[in-house]
Amino acid sequence: MSRDELIEYALQSDIMKNWHYFQFHFSFYHKEMEHELCKSIINSCISCELKIEGIAKNFIDRIASINGRVKQQSDYEQLLQILAELLIVEKTLSFEWENVREYKHEPTTGESKKNPEVNIVTDNYTIGVEVKSPKIIDHMNVRASNPFQLPARSPIIDFYGKEHTTLPRDNPVKDFLISADEKFKSFKETIPNYYGVLVIVWDDYIYEPISSLLSEGSGLFTEASFYIDTDKNAVKFPNIDCVVLTRHLLQIIRGTRGEPLPDEVKTPLEYGDKTIFPFKVHIVNPASSVTIPDEVIQCFQTHEPSFMLGAEYSPTDQITWFN
């Protein structure tokens, strides 16, 4: 499929036939112009199509299907999640994996109907990639409305009080881990050398998911995890080998709003590289029994979380907002 054919396909879809958050953006094509958001979407879809036939139309169909409800915030957040998935899938498929044999979109195995976004099959191993992003708009609006924020669960809440404190967003991270672990499970059981990678696309406040995973007092990847079983032991997620965290949701949101993009980013769906701020990080799951291939780190261009990257790249106990 050519780029022009995909644009025409989008213009004939429900994006233009019914009320849609992106109708304004795609209407630029009727004026022989191109909105930067649509340019990013089309380019990313075509890039994916080079590796998996039919995936470009699949993404446009999913975007177009969220229509008809005027200014429904949940619909907008679904669209953000699709764009986050497109960003990561395109990055995964465009990477030059060594000895690659096959790219699979929404693969299945055995009797399980749960599947990750893509599998990259090479001569040496198979990489499964699952993409998650949170509902973020309400949280963005209230994040700094309180004088205090707790990125992780802490007894400090008894001192500050809930009415003055923005609470942790660790439940979405927990749900992401549960879902990804279930999706990777059947692949781990049936495919030798299978590696499960969960990519969480967050906004600029990346200390929130980092703290949710690594906080010494309640982190989901620690023995002190707030998520425990009936024997009060921390629940593990053995089928996830590492978690990649990015801050790309901010630039996607700004791209949909036509606002200036952050830092050195040039387009709404630009992944950037390892040297460009904002940085991407990976967290190895201590419950994993394998060593993640170096190619995964190279593909997603990640660092290990560290204060050297900036204060927001380490677990944080509390935030005080000055208004």
Image (cartoon, helix red, strand yellow):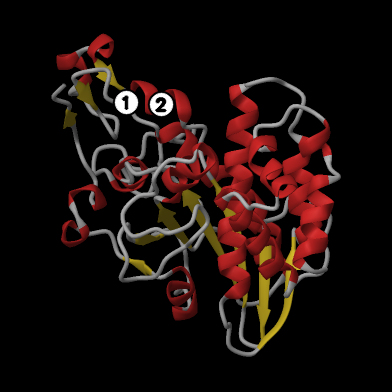
Circle 1: element type:
loop
Residue 133 tag number: none
> On the image, numbered disc 2 is attached to which residue?
139
Circle 2: element type:
helix
The Cα–Cα distance between marks 2 and 1, rounded to whole angstroms, is: 5 Å
Q: Position of residue 158 (x, y in %)?
A: 19, 15
> On the image, numbered disc 1 is attached to which residue?
143
Which part of the image, by quadrant, shows the N terminus?
A: bottom right
Query: Residue, x 49% and y 73% (percent of image)?
Result: 299
Q: What amino acid is at disc 2?
A: His
Can see residue 1? Answer: yes
User: Local crowd at mark 2 within 10 Å, few (<14), some, or many (≥20)?
Assistant: some
Q: Position of residue 61 (x, y in %)?
A: 80, 46
Q: Report whether 212 appears left or right of 49.
A: left
Query: Residue, x 32% and y 66% (percent of image)?
Result: 276
Dividing the picture into quadrants, the one containing residue 93 is bottom right
**Residue placed most toward the observer, 117 or 80:** 80
The mark tally for this picture is 2
Q: Report whether 289 appears left or right of 168.
A: right
Q: Are marks 2 and 1 in contact (CB under 8 Å)?
A: yes
**Residue placed most toward the observer, 229 or 321:** 321
User: Local crowd at mark 1 within 10 Å, few (<14), some, or many (≥20)?
Assistant: some
Q: Position of residue 283 (x, y in %)?
A: 37, 59
Which part of the image, by quadrant, shows the C terminus?
A: top left
Is 110 situated above or below 274? Answer: above
Can see residue 189? Answer: no
Is 268 situated above or below 272? Answer: above
